[in-house]
Image (cartoon, rainbow, N blue to C red):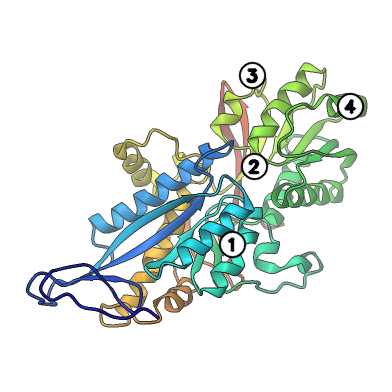
Amino acid sequence: MLILTTALTTGALTLSACGSRDDKGDDGNTEGKKTTVVIGLDAPLTGDLSALGQGIKNSAELALNNANKTKEVPGVTFEFRALDDQAQPTSGQQNATKLAGDKQVLGIVGPLNSSVAQSMQQVAQSNNIALISPANTTPDLTQGKDWKQDKRKRQFSTYFRTSTTDEVQGSFGGKYAYENIKAKTVYVIDDQKTYGVGLATAFSAKFTALGGKVVGTEHVNPEDRDFKAIVSKAKTANPDLVFYGGEYPASAPLSQQLKDGGVKAPLMGGDGMYSGDYITLNKKSAGDYATSVGKPVEQLDSAKKFIADYKTAGYKDRYEAYGGSTYDATWALVQAVKAVTTANDGKLPSDARAKVVDALNKVKFDGVTGPVSFDKYGDTTNTLITAYQVDANQWKSRYSAEYKG
C-alpha cells in the first residue's frame, strides 16, 4: 500500500492510498479537490496491425476526453496512458505488469488480440485491476476451454469485453456462408493463433451442421506472405468459398494470390479481416466477405455523436472496426469509477480497484454500439453481428442480426 502524504504549502500532486492523485490547492483547502484516475491501454500501435490499434487508442482517448469535458465523474479527472504491444503476447504481459504496478491506474482497455489477452489476464487478476477488451473474441478467455462441452466457468473475475465471442461470430459466419452466399463447399485455412483457430473451428462446425462440406484444411503462419502451395491445393479442391481464420496482413495477399492462381471462390474471414487496410493491400479484394461484431456505427443513431466527435478531434487514423466498442469499453470503466465514487461520498475508497471490478459487473448504459452490459462470464450481452462484402473499394454491410444460434 502507498503511504498517504500531503503537501499543504506547495500545492503538489500527491499519491493517495487508493492510487489517486489529489490536488488540494496552495492553501490546503480541500474544497474543489480533484482526484486523478489513470486508465491504461494496451494495443498494437506499431506493426502490421497498427491500423486497428491506432483506431482503438484514439477511441479510448476520445472517451476519456469527453468524460473530462463534461465532468462525467464529479471531482475526478481522467488521464490516459497507452502502451504498444505490437500484437505480441510477451509485450502485452509486460505492459499489463507495468500498468498494474502503477496504483493510479484503475483499469486497462485492450488488448486487440486474444493471444495477447491470454498473457495479460493473470497479471490483471493478481493485481485486481479491470481488463476490458473491445476486440477479443475467443470464448476460452471468459468461459474456459470446456465451453464446447457446455462446461462453462468464468476464468477471471477482472476480465470483461465489449465484443461478442467467436462462438457467436464463427457460427454466424458459417450460417451466412451456407444460407446467404449459398456456398456448399469450403476450403478452411487458419493462422494457428488463438483467434484464428477458434474462429475457423466455429465457422466449420456451423457450416457442416447445416449440410455444407469442408473440402480441405490448411494451417499457415501469421507472418506468411507466400501462399503458392495453398493456392494449388485450393484450386484442385475447387470450393465455393475459402474461409480464413486470421487477420488482414496475411489474408489480403492470400486473397490476391488465390485469385491470381485461378481460384474463383471469394475469401471470407472474421473481424480480424474487416479493415480498410485489407482493401488497400489487396487489389483483388472485390467480392470478398468478412463478419464483424456489432453493426456498422455509421448506421447507428447511437453512434452519431461518436463519429462527429472523432472527426472534430482530427485523428489521422480511422476508428476502424473497434472504434465504437472501444469507446464503450472505456466508458464502462468511466461509469464504474462513477459508481464507486458516488457510493463513497464522492471519493475513491482505499480498495478502488476491487470496487471498480465489482461495479463493472453491474454497469448498464446505452453506448455507441447499443446497450452495454456484461453477463456472468464478463462477456457482452450484445450479440449483434454483421456480414460485409467488398464492393467498389469499400466494405459494405450486407446483413446484420442478433445471433441466436
- Residue at the image point whose x is 36% and y is 62% from the top: 38
Give how far apart the Cα atoms at labels 3 and 1 are.
Answer: 36 Å
The residue where tag 4 is placed is: 238
Question: Label 1 amino acid?
Answer: Met
Residue 180 point in image, percent of width and height = 73, 37
The residue where tag 2 is placed is: 291
Which is more toward the observer, 199 or 9? 9
The residue where tag 3 is placed is: 283
Give how far apart the Cα atoms at labels 3 and 2 are.
Answer: 20 Å
CA neighbours of label 4 inside 10 A, class few (<14), some (14 to 19), many (20+): some
CA neighbours of label 1 inside 10 A, class few (<14), some (14 to 19), many (20+): many
Q: Is residue 136 left or right of residue 69?
A: right
Give how far apart the Cα atoms at labels 4 and 1 are.
Answer: 41 Å
Position of 228 relative to 20 (above/below) = above
- Residue at the image point whose x is 50% and y is 39% from the top: 320
- Residue at the image point whose x is 91% and y is 29% from the top: 237
Pick whichever of labels 1 and 2 is earlier in the sequence. Answer: 1
Pick whichever of labels 3 and 2 is earlier in the sequence. Answer: 3
Pick whichever of labels 4 and 2 is earlier in the sequence. Answer: 4
Question: Label 4 amino acid?
Answer: Asn
Q: Quadrant of residue 94?
A: bottom right
Give how far apart the Cα atoms at labels 1 and 2 are.
Answer: 26 Å
Q: Disc 4 on helix, strand or loop?
A: loop
In front: mark 3 or mark 2?
3
Question: Label 3 amino acid?
Answer: Lys
Which is more toward the observer, 134 or 362? 134
Give how far apart the Cα atoms at labels 4 and 2 are.
Answer: 23 Å
Q: Disc 3 on helix, strand or loop?
A: loop
In front: mark 3 or mark 1?
1
The residue where tag 1 is placed is: 120
